[in-house]
Amino acid sequence: MSTPARGSRPRDRKAQLAAVAAGLFRARGFHGVGINDIAAAAGVTGPALYRHFADKQAILAYVVLAGIDDMEAVTASALSGAPDQLEVLLTGLATQAVERREIAALWRWEGPHLPRDERREIRHRSGAVLDAWTKALLGVRPSLATDDAEFLCWGALSVFGSVAVHHTTVARRRFVPLLVELALAVLNSTLPAGGSAEPVRDGLGTPSRREQVLAAATSLFGERGFHAVSMEDIGAAAGIAGPSVYRHFPSKAALMVAIGHRAADRLALAAEQALRAPDELSALRRLAASYVHTLLHTPELLVSFTADRVTMPDRDKADLLRVQRDYVDQWVALLATISPTLPAREAKIRVHAALTIANDLTRTRRVSGRANLEAELTALLHAVLERPIP
């Protein structure tokens, strides 16, 4: 499926409606937005909206595929043989990310709501774009192994995608160069040699029934998404009847809240241990390493990142958001102490870029099976956080 050419009035109107929908999807999540919400925000009626789109999925597909179109166009133009083509490419991608932040958000989080054909097309086309970026990087760094170059390109893509997970901004004339600098820090990274991974020890004894239910829900939500899983599914996975799940959790939303708090508790414990360092730089490095380690060995984290928060009660949603912000603020405070001339907003943008690299690449199948992933991800986070201030 390709995006229609934009020029005639009806098609411009279609793009305008899609832009309104994209903003709502980003703010509330796909399941938190109805057709009537989109129509009201756009100042049209529901039937008028249906003249352009068959349903919400069609709107989401239009928006995401339009973003793929733009990424392909930027890539083709930058890699057409011009000098400094890699930096031209990064500048184009950074500009696109800054100007259309909602596209990255929808691609990253709402893609599972697309029909199977659209998901397949997005994987195919985005994979082809990453292949082109990989070839461009190998042209600059020919000594890299192809799979290492691809890994670094995925990391750079996450730098641009990170603008979708926060609302911090700086002037555009600075925002675009900042993202380019951080992407270059990733692409210029030296990946560490393989080493033996730290063993992960299992807990002692048999987990309680409540813990078994929570583990089953975590696994199913991670595989299928929150809305595709029933309490009966969770009960079956935990080896109990579906209604028995309600003895431990009153609803699926309560399960998701518990998963979110479990993830926050594990991060807080890891951060507390990491911050017992002799100086701020060592503390920041340990914090990055602890985050990657916890992320790789704590399935609750990945589920909580992809959760549709609209399903949670407002009080729990606000509480978890506060906990997340406090955690990010720890990173920002350390970075500000290490680099006191770094503007506060730029420090926050760096931290979000680093966290997004770890979050994305642990979920990206093409790279998540790398043998030395934990050390490599930690190195990328260090590169982004410690890049000298220009």
Image: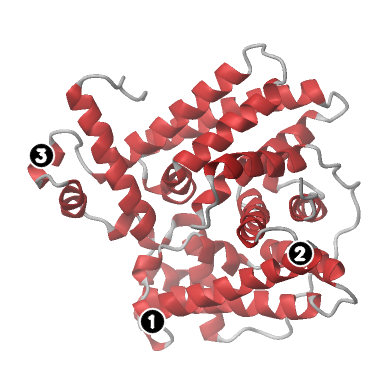
Q: Secondary structure at mark 3?
A: helix
Neighbor class of circle 3 (other Cα within 10 Å; few <14, some 14-19, many 20+) is few
Mark 1 lies on residue: 315
Where does the image place residue 99, in percent across and percent down from the top left?
Answer: 46, 39
- Report the residue at 68% width, 73% height from top: 330
| Residue 239 against residue 359 in the figure, above or below | below
Q: Quadrant of residue 240?
A: bottom left
Which mark identifies residue 355? none
Where does the image place residue 170, in percent across and percent down from the top left?
Answer: 55, 51
- Amino acid type at image mark 1: Arg
- Report the residue at 41% width, 83% height from top: 249
Closer to us: mark 2 or mark 3? Answer: 2
Q: Earlier in the sequence, mark 2 or mark 3?
A: 3
Mark 2–mark 3 Cα distance, whole angstroms, equals 53 Å
- Amino acid type at image mark 2: Pro
- Report the residue at 57% width, 78% height from top: 262
Outermost residue to the top: 81
Mark 3 lies on residue: 48
Q: Nearer the viewer, residue 332 or 251?
A: 332
Closer to us: mark 1 or mark 2? Answer: 2
Mark 1–mark 3 Cα distance, whole angstroms, equals 36 Å
- Amino acid type at image mark 3: Ala
Image quadrant in which the C terminus is located: top right
Mark 2 lies on residue: 340
Neighbor class of circle 2 (other Cα within 10 Å; few <14, some 14-19, many 20+) is few
Where does the image place residue 139, in percent across and percent down from the top left?
Answer: 78, 20
Q: Earlier in the sequence, mark 1 or mark 3?
A: 3
Q: Earlier in the sequence, mark 1 or mark 2?
A: 1
Q: Secondary structure at mark 1?
A: helix
Q: Quadrant of residue 60?
A: top left
